[in-house]
Image (tube, rainbow, N blue to C red):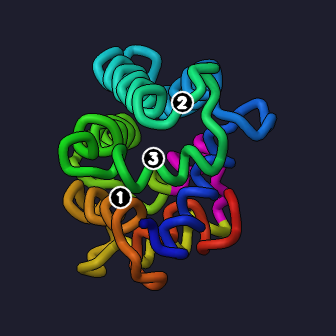
Amino acid sequence: MASAVKNQKFAVLFTWFDQDQDGQLSEDDMRTTAKVFAQVARDEDHSNISALHSAFEQWWQLLLQHADTDGDGQISRTEFITTMEASVTSPEHFESAVMAIADAVMNAADTDTDGVLSRDEYIRMYETLGVAPEHSGPAFTRLDLDGNGVISHDEFRAAIVDFYLSNNPDAPGNYLLGPIGHPA
């Protein structure tokens, strides 16, 4: 059973993905979310754009398989939260769905290809994804675990793991979309 912290994070994530704001996730919502994420990449960055679309498709298929119990092609908030804990974040699926998106979006946002995200690259990435700079700026500081002024690939992956897997309300990754309880 998911903790209250995870439930809160997954509820924020559901709202973020529910592109048409109808209270249900659909294939169109996930495709639109993938298109939003793909906007982080440069137009010619076909590899990361393709990786993002593939990973969101993988995530959608997991949701359909594990959450769409009535077969209507819609996932409710409750179904989403339950399935996130039970299936999407399980070890056999987490890397191919969630971490594949994290890797592709980080690679796409690293516009100078130096292997790290500067504060500007990080804020620009999340602004493209709809997260206000007043949330992404402080999040950057929390995620820069070694305090060197950049977020490494390992630090970004650690933040993603925190967001999806940690029950600790103070985990740095919980601030990716703004403070818990404050949707992006």
The quadrant where residue 95 appears = top left
Which of the pair 43/58 is nearer the observer?
58
How much space separates mark 1 and mark 2, taking CA atoms?
A: 25 Å
Mark 3 sits on what residue? 83
The structure residue drawn at horizontal position 49% and vertical position 52%, both measured from the top left corner, is 82
Q: Which residues are magenta?
A: 123-133
The quadrant where residue 177 appears = bottom right
User: Of tags 1 and 3, which is closer to the observer?
Assistant: 3
Q: Position of residue 117 (x, y in %)?
A: 34, 54
The quadrant where residue 101 appears = top left
Mark 1 sits on what residue? 160
Residue 60 is covered by the magenta coloring = no
Q: Position of residue 43 (x, y in %)?
A: 46, 17
Mark found first going from the N terminus, 2 or 3: 2
Task: Identify residue type, mark 2.
Answer: Asp
The structure residue drawn at horizontal position 57% and vertical position 45%, both measured from the top left corner, is 79
User: Is there any visible trace of residue 82 in the rendered image?
Assistant: yes
User: Is there any visible trace of residue 111 in the rendered image?
Assistant: no
